Amino acid sequence: MRAITYTEYGPSEVLQFTEVAKPTPKDDEVLIRIRAASVNPLDWHYLRGAPYVVRLMTGWRRPKVTRLGVDVAGQVEAVGRNVTQFQPGDEVFGACRGAFAEYGCASEKALVLKPANVTFEQAAAVPVAAFTALQGLRDKGRIQRGQKVLINGAAGGVGTFAVQIARVFGAEVTGVCSTRNVDMVRTIGANHVVDYTQEDFTKSGQRYDLIFDSVGNHSLSDCRRALTTEGTLVLVGGTDKGRWLGALTGVLKAVVLSRFVSQKLLPFLAHLRKDDLIVMRELLEAGKVTPVIDRSYPLRDVPEAIRYLEAGHARGKVVITMEHRGET
C-alpha cells in the first residue's frame, strides 16, 4: 500500500510517498480502508521533533515511529478476533496512528460509527481538534449556560469547533479572527466577532467569564485584563518558538502565576476518549456541529498540506483524501 513515511526529523521535504506493507490488525484492532485523514499541528511537531521536549516521546536522534497522521475516517476492512463493535463494511471515524496511508490499524476503543449525514472528509476533520475544543471548554473551562466566552483563534481547526461547541453549551460567544474570516465565524454561530487586525480584545474593556485561547499571541497579563475577577483562561496553543520547550514556556508561567491570582489560568492537552467521540458523533448527527474544511490534498501531497497548515492561515481543517488503486 502507499503511505507517507519519514526516517529523520526536518521540514516537510523529508517526507516520502512510498510503498509499505499493508498492516494486519491485532486481536483488539480494526483494519481500516482509509478514505480521509486530516492534518494537525501535532503532525509537524512530530515531523520536526520540535520543540526538543517532543523527542522524549518520539526518539531523540531520529523518529521511533516513521508514520504520521492521527485523525481518520474510512471503512472497516477486517477485524481482530476480540473485536465486537464493528464488522467489515462499517463506516467509522476516530484515531489511528499512521493515518496518512491507504490502510491503517486502530484500537476498537478509538473508533465510532460515522454518521450517515457527514462525508468521510468531514468525519476525518473531527477527532483531535474537536476533542481539544470539547474537553478544553467543558472539562477545563467548566463552561456554563449564559457565560460570556471568547474564542481566540476562532477561524482555525480547533477554533471553529470551539465556537460551535460553546454555543451548544448555551454560552454567549465572541470569536477573534482576521478580516477575511469574520463572516465565516458568524456563520458557524459566534454572537460577536472581533477582527484582530482592527481591534485588540485585551484592550477593549470587555470582560469574559471564559477565554479559550488556541493561538497564544497575547501575554498572560493581557489576557487576564480581559477576564472577570473569577474568570478562567484555557491555554491550548502558543507562538513561542523556543527550541527546547516551545509553547510549554507559557504553560509553566501560567502554572506559577495561577497560584497567586483569583483567576484560573489553565494549560490544557486533549486526550482520546471514546465517550467524547460518541458525543461528537451525536452533535454531528444532530447538525449542531459542522466541520469547516479549508482545503483537501491527495495523499502524495501531504508535505504541501503540512506546509500550508504550519504557515498559520488555514480556515478550519486541512484534509487528506485517499484514492485507492482501481478507483476513478
Image (tube, rainbow, N blue to C red):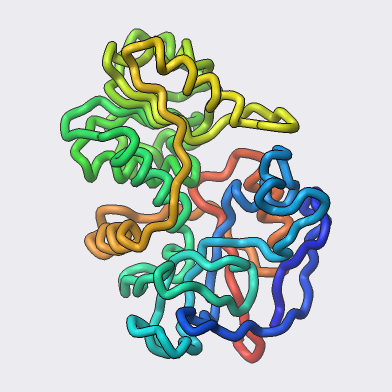
Name above or below for residue 220 compared with residue 181: above
Asked if residue 301 shows in the view, the reply is no
> Residue sitting at 69 percent across and 30 percent down?
241
Q: Nearer the viewer, residue 109 or 223?
A: 109
> Residue sitting at 80 percent across and 66 percent down?
16
Q: Nearer the viewer, residue 161 or 106?
A: 106
Q: Is residue 289 left or right of residue 303?
A: left
Viewport quadrant of the C terminus? bottom right
Viewport quadrant of the N terminus? bottom right
> Residue sitting at 41 percent across and 41 percent down?
184
x and y, in percent, of residue 323 in the image: 62, 79
Asked if residue 269 shows in the view, the reply is yes
> Residue sitting at 38 percent across and 58 percent down?
273
Name above or below for residue 128 compared with residue 27: above
Dividing the picture into quarters, in which one does residue 170 lie? top left
Q: Is residue 168 left or right of residue 157?
A: left
x and y, in percent, of residue 121 in the image: 48, 66
Dividing the picture into quarters, in which one does residue 312 lie? top right
Q: Is residue 311 left or right of residue 268?
A: right
x and y, in percent, of residue 107 in the image: 47, 73
Give the total number of marks visible in the rendering: 0
x and y, in percent, of residue 110 in the image: 43, 67
